[in-house]
Image (tube, grey):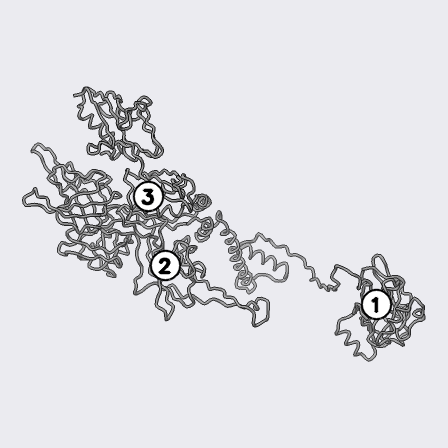
Amino acid sequence: MSGTRYHCCDLRRRNAVAAHPVLNGLEALEVIDRDLPAADPLRQRTLLLYFLKPVTGAGFTRDNVHITGGERVRDPEVEWAGVASLPPPELSDAGEADTAAIVAALDDQDHILVVRVANAGDYSRYTLTLTAAGSDVPPADFDPRMTSIEFTFKAECPSDFDCRDAHVCPPQERATPDINYLARDYSTFRRLMLDRMAHQVPDWRPGSVADGGVALIELLAYVGDQLAYRQDAIATEAYLGTARRRESVRRHAALVDYDMHDGCNARAFVHLRLDPAVASLVVPRDGTQFLTRCERLDVGIASGSSEFREALLQKPVFFEPMETVTLLAAHNELNFHTWSDTDCCLPAGATRATLVGDHSALDGRWLLFEEVRGPRTGESSDADPTHRQVVMVTNATMMMDPVPDPPVTVTEIEWGTADALTFPLCISATRTTPEGTEFFTDISVARGNLVLADHGRTLQDAAAPEVLGTMPAGRVLSLASEGGHCDTAPRREVPARFRPTLEEGPVTQCAAPDLASAWSAVRSTVIDAVPAITLTGTFAPEPPELWEPRRSLLRSDGNARHFVVEVGNAGRATLRFGDGRYAERPAADTQFTAIYRVGNGTAGNIGAEALAHIVGVDVDAILAVRNPLHADFGVEPETLETVRRRAPEAFRRQERAVTPADYVEVTQRVAGIERAAARMRWTGSWHTMFVTVDREGGAPLDDTLRGTLETHIDGFRMTGHDLEFEEPVRVSLEISLHVCVKSDYFRSDVKQGLLDLFSSEIRANGERGVFHPDNFSFGTPVYLSPLLAAAREVPGVASVEARVFARQGDEDTTALEDGRLVLGPREIARLDNNPNFPEHGVLTLELHGGK
């Protein structure tokens, strides 16, 4: 027979009663339902009670069975009850045939009591209880725990609910303690726990601080304080606007492609004067250092000597060479050759000069031009210290000047336009005195033996690098240990955390120099600066391997030995390695050592003549050390406030070129480009973007700049866009002015003043001439009224009138009548007034009056 049985007690109680020699008990209850036909009215009205022992002699009747409970059908009435082995007379009726057949087929009929109820119950829970007749106590010889059972009449009815009985043992409800959740520090945690102890243990009284209870409370308060701080710190560092650690701000900024920088060191050119008794000397890059002036010390200081230790006590600023150079005694001081000129001057913008002697070895070297005597007095104290400039010699050709007797050997030197002189350099001069005319030579000289150096000091050497530690092994965790118990469960590796910190700081941030010119070599940018660290990893028995610093690991593949240096708020540098996907993760037991430099930021922006000592080998051969120009371009690390302001706006900067305006903006990012113009054309097979470039100073577009522009713009241009670079269209002007000179001025002086004003060069006072190339750009119209107003400011000019104002060779007078000369989008005005190149614009001056 199928059905659902309801058991009254747990298995242990059931077995204990079954083993008792006398006690009996109710084991289970079953409702006869689906075993009867569907239309049988007796379904769910017959109950079978199973006992542990026979109940034949117990004499159970309807008075011994009580059913309680229910919602719609309350406390169903029992009609009759009888033992299955002795069927009651009611089962012999015709309508009871099916039920009688079920009862007759039961096993152990003397253990079963058949109960008939008047009405089937509902879906509620009911309780059946056996009692002695006429009382509420259990029947005689029955276990009191096994005389009652819960059941439902609808056990076999279809239902969407789970029929499994849920036995829930809810925990005992406890009163919630009154705790101040605003307690976030040690003192409030301590006070809170003392108050709680007074409530929980009223008899306990805190004694001295050495009391065990007080010590435990203070220990817990300390731990709570640390945990609260950790929670607050995590919440604070989770947002860019509230983060306080540089590491957190750097990572937040990286999410919007903003690269936070840690500053950059300064650079300077250092001049070394070699002992004439030493023909040449090699100054190595490694092991050589330059120091700012220290009291009571010689120029040369031996490494590791007592003088060096004394110098360290004075805390000098350290510079180190960026290249190995060979010094020549002949290059200590070089004289200019004037070609018999008595008033010789290299004009601003000059890119060539002549030196006395054979100095062809200067090719590819740095050269300093320096004014050493005053042009008016010839005294060294009157020399202008701002008239100093370093250039890179690109060509040095030896030749002869046959005029002197005997002929003089000279060297013609040239340098690039990037190093063009920014001021007029006087070489020789004459002065008229009552005693006669005095001639001054060597007003300015050239000096070789220059070394490009940058700020920073190397702390270690190859023999004794700083040991950073050993990469620990990762932990292997079995997934079974996290909840399972199978020995064959999959395992995963938790990588070890290895973040070594450098002992000294701040770490030098430097970039590789651009040796194309002196102008570019001395300039450093924070964009290209990386930490000056030589990191070596040794994994025995493999040979040591170098790891390279990077600003970010996002562009490093999984096999690249790269690392990142993260500088904290205190300037301490921490090294972070890759994870195997972005840069290689070091193998376990890899030992790391480092050689690095310290010194960064504006501390290296020292003034001219600040360096005075050299540390290294063969220092006795160096007679003098100096930096003729101030050190510059040292930048402090970016502040957190600056990053918070700039990072949200950085991702809005378009890093692709689509429209002509985009190409113009990207092109103008290149150094030396004043303005650019772009236009797109269909050339028959694809679109070509023609970019017209206006360089600073009107310099031509050479092959070097073309290559630089192509490399730079290639990362921005759209696929399918070809690039072509063009020179601007220079529009030569023709201007004729009629000038009336005041009676007390010489016409020649006024003319000279007007020519100087309307020149295309840098004037003697450092200002640009009116027609300097940088005063005009693409499509800039030329207005006549500002030209006339400027001419009237020249001393001695009474009035001025324009007679011609047009494009050169154009007889159209529209521009003169309108007072404005309109230029096209790719056109730039030009008026050089150079007699050697009259096609570059002509200025005609007609002066009347005066003397």
Residue type beneath disc 1: Asp
- Which circle's residue, 3 or 2, is located before the other in the chain? 2
Residue depth check, mark 1 versus mark 2: number of the one nearer the observer:
1
Q: Position of residue 402 (x, y in %)?
A: 8, 43
Q: Is residue 473 above or below residue 401?
A: below
- Which circle's residue, 1 or 3, is located before the other in the chain? 1
Residue type beneath disc 2: Glu
Q: Position of residue 450 (x, y in %)?
A: 22, 50
Q: Is residue 75 above or below residue 608?
A: below
Q: Is residue 589 above or below residue 278?
A: below
Label 2, residues with CA under 10 Å away: few <14, some 14-19, many ≥20:
some
Residue on which the image places disc 3? 671
Q: SS at mark 1?
A: loop
Instruction: Name the image quarter holding the C terminus.
Output: top left
Q: In this rendered view, identify the residue nearer to me: 147 or 210.
A: 147
Q: SS at mark 3?
A: loop
Residue on which the image places disc 1? 35
Residue on which the image places disc 2? 548
Report whether 437 appears left or right of 115. left
Report whether 13 appears left or right of 676. right
Count all numbered tags in the image, as a single digit: 3
